[in-house]
Amino acid sequence: MKRLLHMSYLAAGVGGLGFFAMSILLLGVWPGRALQDQIGRTQPQHPPHLTASEQRGRVIYGREGCAYCHTQQIRYVAADVARFGKATLAWETIYDYPHLWGTRRIGPDLSREAGTRPQDWQLSHLYAPRTLVADSVMPAFPWLFAGAPDRPLQEARDLVNYLETLGRNRELVGAEGEAFARMACNCPGDEEKFGFGAGPLNASPAMARRAGAFPKLEAGDAAAGRALYATHCAGCHGVAGLGDGPGAAGLQPKPANLAEREYSGDQIGFVLWNGVAGTSMPAWRDLAAGDLASLAEAVRGFHAAQSEPPIPRAVLDLGARVYTDRCAQCHGRNGGGDGPAAAQFPIAPANFRGRRPSIAASLRAVREGVAGTPMAPWAGELAEAELSAAAYYVRTFFVGDAR
Ligand code: HEC
Ligand code: HEC
Ligand code: HEC
C-alpha cells in the first residue's frame, strides 16, 4: 500500500509534465509548423524586406501606440472582408516581426493602407486628424512635424513610408501570385472564400479611383446637403466652399474652390463616387445614395453665377488652334480630359465637359499652372493673346446636364 502511494506521486508527476509537453506541442509547435508550411507553400515569391526608413517607421508605429487603436489583420469574417478587403494570409507579414497586429479596433484596420491615401493626406491627418475627418477621435501627432503639416520631420516620413508597406506585398504578387497562393493553399470553405474570393484586395470606400461607373444621383435635399458638407467636406473645402478649410494648408493640390466652378450633375456624381485619384480628395462610397445627392446640391449651391462678357469669334478661333496644338493631347479633342497622353499622369487632366471654371480661374490656371498637378504654367510658353484665347476656349466645352 505504502509503495503504491509512492508510485501515484510519480504517476501524477509524469502525467503533469506530459500534459505540459502535450499542450506546448498541440497549441504552440504544431500550429506553428502548419503555418510555416502554409507560408512556404503559398508565399508566391520572397516579399521585399522593409527598407531602413520603413523599419524605423515600424518602430515609431509601435512607440506612438498606433496598435492600441488599429489592427493589421483582416479576419476571416464577411464583415471584415466587405469593409477592408481580402482576409490577411499568413505570409503577408512574415518580415513584420514582432507583429503589430493589434487587438483593438477603435480606428479602421490598416492592413491594406498602402495606396489607399496619398502622402499629403497621410501627413495632414497625422498632424491634426480632425482638420480632415471632423469627428475623428484619433489623437494628433504634431511632435513628428516642424510646426506645419507640410513640414514633416524624418520621423513622420518614416511612419508614412511604413504605412505604405501595409498590404504592399499582397498587391505586388499580382494575379499570377494570387492564383499560385490559392492553388497551393488548397484551403477549405471560409478560408478560400474570404482569403481569395471575388471582390477587391483593398475595399476601402475612401480609396480614390481614376475610373468607375457611378450611381445616377436623384434630386437631393439642399439643407441636409449643407449639414453633411459641414461635417465631411468643410475641413478641406472651407465653410463657403472656397477651398480654404483648416485641413487645406498641407494639401497639394489644394482642395477645389467650389464657388468658382460650375459642375454638371454627372461630374459631381463621378467625383463623389470615385474621389479624385492622385489627390487627397477621397471617394465617398460609404455614404447613402440620398446623402450623395444632397451633397451634390450643396456643392452646386456654392457656385456664384457671374455676368460674363461675350468672347469674339476670332478669339475663340485662335483659342481652338492653340488648344489643338498644345492642350488636346492631355485634355482631349472634345475637352473630356481623355487625350492620348492623359493616362500617363497620376492626376487626370480636367474634364471641361463636366466642369467649367470661371474666366478668372481659367486664366489663372493657364497662366500659373495648377500646383501639385501635371498642369504646367504656360505664361512663358505662349503669348498673352494665345494664352487667354485658350483659357476662354476651354470653357466652351461645358455641356452641363444636357445630353
Ligand atoms: C485613440 C485611438 C487611435 C490612435 C492611438 C491612433 N489612431 Fe489612427 N485612427 C483612429 C480613428 C478613430 C480613425 C478613423 C477616423 C480618422 O480617419 O481620423 C483613424 C484613422 C487612421 C488612418 C486612416 C485610415 C484610412 O485610410 O481611412 C490612418 C492611416 C491612421 N489612423 C494611422 C494611425 C497611426 C500611424 C497612428 C499612430 C501614430 C494612429 N493612427 C493612432 C484612432 C486612432
Ligand atoms: C481631405 C481633403 C478633402 C475632403 C475631406 C474633401 N475634398 Fe473635395 N477635393 C479635395 C481636393 C484636393 C480636390 C482636387 C483638386 C484638384 O483636382 O485640383 C477636391 C476636388 C473636389 C471637387 C471637384 C472635382 C472636379 O472634378 O473638379 C468636388 C466637387 C469636391 N471635391 C467635393 C467634395 C465634397 C462634396 C466633399 C465632402 C463629401 C469633399 N470634396 C471632401 C480635397 C478634399
Ligand atoms: C500634361 C497634360 C496637360 C496639358 C498639356 C495641359 N493641361 Fe490643363 N490641366 C492638366 C491637369 C492634370 C489639370 C488639373 C486637374 C485637376 O486639378 O484636377 C489641368 C487643369 C487645367 C485647367 C483648370 C481647370 C479648372 O477647373 O480649374 C485649365 C483651365 C487648363 N488645364 C487649361 C489648359 C490649356 C488651355 C492647356 C493648353 C495651353 C492645357 N491645359 C494643357 C493637364 C494638362
Image (cartoon, rainbow, N blue to C red):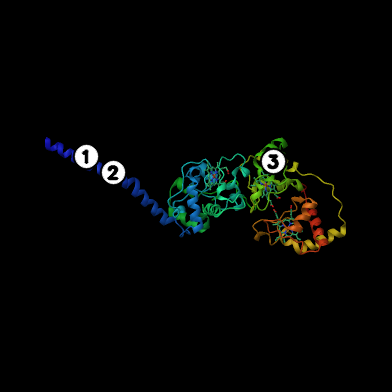
Horizontal side of 333 relative to 66 (left or right) equals right
**Mark 1: few/some/many CA within 10 Å (<14, 14-19, 20+):** few
Q: Amino acid at mark 3?
A: Leu
Whichever of callouts 1 and 2 sits on the residue coming sooner in the sequence is: 1
Q: Indicate if the residue with disc 3 has its beta carbon within 8 Å of ligand 2.
A: yes
Q: Reading the chain from its start, which is encountered first: label 3 or label 2?
A: 2
Where residue 281 sits: x, y (%)?
Answer: 65, 48
Residue 295, which numbered label? 3
Residue labelled 2 has its Cβ within 8 Å of some atom of ligand 1: no
Q: Which residue is mark 1?
A: 12
Task: Determine contact: label 1, label 3, CB under 8 Å.
Answer: no
Residue type at tag 2: Phe
Whether label 1 lies within 8 Å of ligand 1 gets the answer no
Q: The residue under label 1 is which amino acid type? A: Ala
How dense is the environment of label 3, judged by Cα within 10 Å: few (below 14), some, or many (20 and up)? many
Q: Secondary structure at mark 3?
A: helix
Residue 304, image x, y percentages:
79, 44
Residue 395 appearing in the image: yes
Q: CA distance from mark 1 to mark 3?
A: 72 Å
Q: Which mark is residue 20?
A: 2
Disc 3/disc 2 C-alpha distance (Å): 62 Å
State left or right for residue 396 relative to residue 69.
right
